Image: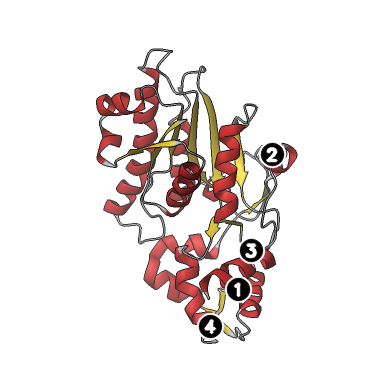
Amino acid sequence: MKIAISGANGYIAKNLVRELKAANHKIVPVERSTLYNVKKLSEILSDVAVVINLAGAPILQRWTAANKQEIRKSRIETNQNMVKAINGLPDNKKPRIFISASAIGIYSSGKVHTERSTSFSSDFIGEVVQGWENASSDLSPKVRKVIFRIGLILGNEAKTIQNVLPLFKMGLGGKIGSGSQPFPFVHIYDAVNAIIWGIEHENARGIYNLVAPDNIDNKTFTKVLAQSVKRPAFFTVPEFALKLVLGKASSLLLQSPQVVPKRLLKEGFVFLFPEIKSCLAEVVKSKT
């Protein structure tokens, strides 16, 4: 099968490409510059079976005017251009499936959300994610569309793990703020497998929450990670310190929605790492 993938240098995409190549699929990488050229996009996407859009500038950075513009553009405009390119193709040249990344940042904090929730966040990220998803609303009905609202990715090469694991191994780990904020996570293997599941299952369409079923908070994540490396975790990253470093982007770490993968579970997807203990056990083992 011929599969076009954008954001190919990202963590999810690198792992996804490896799995798809192992299954003998032909990968067509979509370069960042091409995402802003509809004519070139049409040429690249013609005759591919699947289009997967994983493009997006990093969100966890200070939200300066320039950074906010790039965060919006790299998600909303790229999806719009992909849809324009696909819709402009003859029906016999269109891809059969379009899969787009999205984020749980669309949901408001302080509530529990399944895919049917319409309680969306009104902050910058909430607005971006809504625009990101709405950008594909005009996709031709001849193309099956799947959108994954993805939680925090955990894996041995994930930035979160690379940043915090050395501290935890030194006994310097700790919770963020109060530690009571929800911590919706998903192991990289499950994220990749869910996307492949979305390709292979003809009935898969629409919105899916891509998070593990285990609803934990930041304090629990801290405790389990400390136990995994057999070290104490007495420290706390204070809110004011995060705000000094990240500004308003600190809300990504200090607030979070509680998210349930109801549709994936109902439709038969099986998580390899459904709870935080097995997830972190695999991550820590892989890093040793």
Return the disc, 2 or 1, that comes first in the chain's sequence.
1
Tag in front: 2 or 1: 2
Q: What crowding class fits label 2: few (fewer than 14 Cα within 10 Å), some (14-19), or many (20 or more)? A: some
Placement of 259 over or under 26, stated as above or below: below
Mark toward the start of the polypeptide (4 vs 2): 4
- Name the amino acid type tagged 3: Cys
The residue sitting at 34% across, 35% down in the picture is 77
Give the CA separation, mark 4 to mark 2. Answer: 37 Å
Do the CB atoms of the residues marked 3 and 4 lie less than 8 Å apart? no
The Cα atoms of the two marked residues, 2 and 1, are separated by 31 Å
Which mark is drawn over residue 46? Answer: none
Q: CA distance from mark 3 to mark 1?
A: 23 Å
Which residue lies under the disc numbered 2? 263
> Disc 3 or disc 1, which is closer to the eye?
3
Residue under the image location 42 percent in, 69 percent down: 243
Above or below, comparing residue 223 to residue 66 in the picture: below
Instruction: Tell me, yes or no, whether the two marked residues, 3 and 2, touch with CB atoms within 8 Å.
Output: no
- How far apart marks 3 and 2 lie (CA) works out to 21 Å
- Along the horizontal axis of the image, is 193 left or right of 53? right
**On screen, residue 167 above or below 93:** below
Q: Secondary structure at mark 2?
A: helix
Residue corresponding to mark 1: 178
Q: Nearer the viewer, residue 174 or 238?
A: 174
Residue that mark 3 sits on: 279
The reply to whether residue 101 is in sight is yes
